[in-house]
Amino acid sequence: MGTGFERNVAAADASARSVALAVLRSGPVSRADLARRLGLSTASLTRLTRPMISSGLLVERQPEGGNRTGRPSTPLDIDAGQAHFLGIKITWDVIYAVVCDLKGTVISRTRAAVTDTSAEAVVKQTVAIIDDHRRRGPGVTGVGIGIGGTVEGHRWVRRVPALGWTGEFDLADRLSASVGLPVSVDNDVRALTQGKHWFGEGRECSSLAVITVGVGVGCALVIDDQLYEGRRGLAAKVDHWALDPEGPACPRGHRGCAHQLLASGQVSARASEGMGRPVSFEECMRLAADGEPVTSQIVQHAAACLGLLVSRVADMIAPERVLVTGDGIELAMLGEDRMRTALVANRSTLADADDVRLVRSDFYAWAQGAAAIAIRRHMLTELPVT
Ligand SMILES: [Zn+2]
């Protein structure tokens, strides 16, 4: 417990931080609008923003003409070039990296093939990528990592099936000790969701669900503006939810689970079986788009199951918006009508009001999400605001 003075400083710091965050997410924004959103008087807002304007973090944009009361309104914005962040998405075969400014705008991007999937080798390769970016690009304030596994507390990585990692280790600490920068790690779908929430298609939503289809099926939730991690980082594990009691069984024995019906490798396997020859996921999508009956049936059935999955997630948290994305998004796009019909049919209530959007996200968007994790850490804990 600190002294009264320390508590007051901490409270002022928290208020100033919430102002900086609101400007980051909504800027340029008028002072009146900002005060209303944050429930502050304009006098308090002026007091809180003064140090941040002096330090150059916040900038006053050119007023858009005088308003009716005579005083010109000068919207506040954040100086996006104040800091840069490196976002890295690690997949089983490629490491994608982007440099973003404070507002999440991607400035540069690179990719490198994974040479060895062992944890030791991937850590080493990631350190080399970070060092390389620091040599060539703008100074980096922090690093965010997105990885397809169980991650807790922005550091502990427990299980990464695609890379064959089973042990538990502090990836953030390992990287941070090597590069001498703050490093935050998160599950890749959560990182993507953070990027969409602050800088992408989920901007301005205080609740958001993101469902990804691709090599696996993922989901992450934003509830009351907070990305929800859950106990031991295990929230929103929907990949083995049962969606079709008549469906094929997955290796874990679940009949018709989301992974078995929607993961691209499983879709490809069913198409290959149906066509009597090897058919990749991409070819399956092309054939279905051309109206080939076997693959069309597979895609339409999967899309209906995806609609059921969306309805369950929507029933759970009633989000303002649901984004369906991932490298298997073609499946949802081809079967969109079936997906939406199944969503309405299965949703417990008000289904017609659901805002469900299909979004294309390449792997650099996932890396941008990883940068958003680093930006969040910076904004919430490190940035000097008072
Ligand atoms: Zn399963």
Image (cartoon, rainbow, N blue to C red):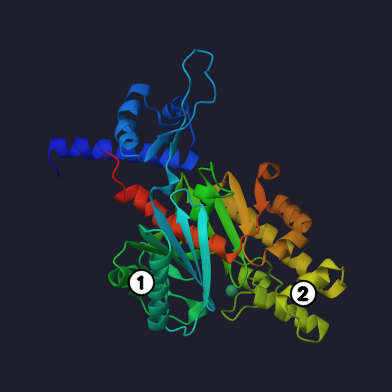
- Circle 2 sits in a helix, a strand or a loop, which is it? helix
Badge 2 is on which residue? Answer: 284
Residue 45: which disc? none
Q: Position of residue 274 (x, y in %)?
A: 80, 81
Do labels 1 and 2 touch, CB within 8 Å?
no
Q: Is residue 88 left or right of residue 208?
A: left
Image quadrant occupied by the C terminus: top left
Q: Is residue 313 left or right of residue 121?
A: right
Compared with residue 285, is residue 318 higher up or lower down, i.e. above or below?
Answer: above
Q: Mark 1 vs ligand 1: CB under 8 Å?
A: no
Residue 171: which disc? 1
Q: Is residue 189 visible?
A: no
Query: Residue furthest toward the front?
Result: 136
* Callout 1 amino acid: Leu
Image quadrant occupied by the N terminus: top left
Residue at point 47% right, 42% down?
25
Residue at point 35% right, 71% down?
171
Quadrant location, ligand no. 1: bottom right
Q: How many residues crowd around disc 1 within 10 Å: few (fewer than 14), some, or many (20 or more)?
A: many
Q: Position of residue 338 (x, y in %)?
A: 77, 58
Q: Is residue 145 left or right of residue 108?
A: left
* Callout 2 amino acid: Cys
Residue at point 51% right, 57% down?
107
- Quadrant position of residue 334: bottom right
Closer to the chain start, of discs 1 and 2, is 1
Compared with residue 340, is residue 62 higher up or lower down, i.e. above or below?
Answer: above
Instruction: Measure how far apart labels 1 and 2 are at the Cα level.
Output: 37 Å
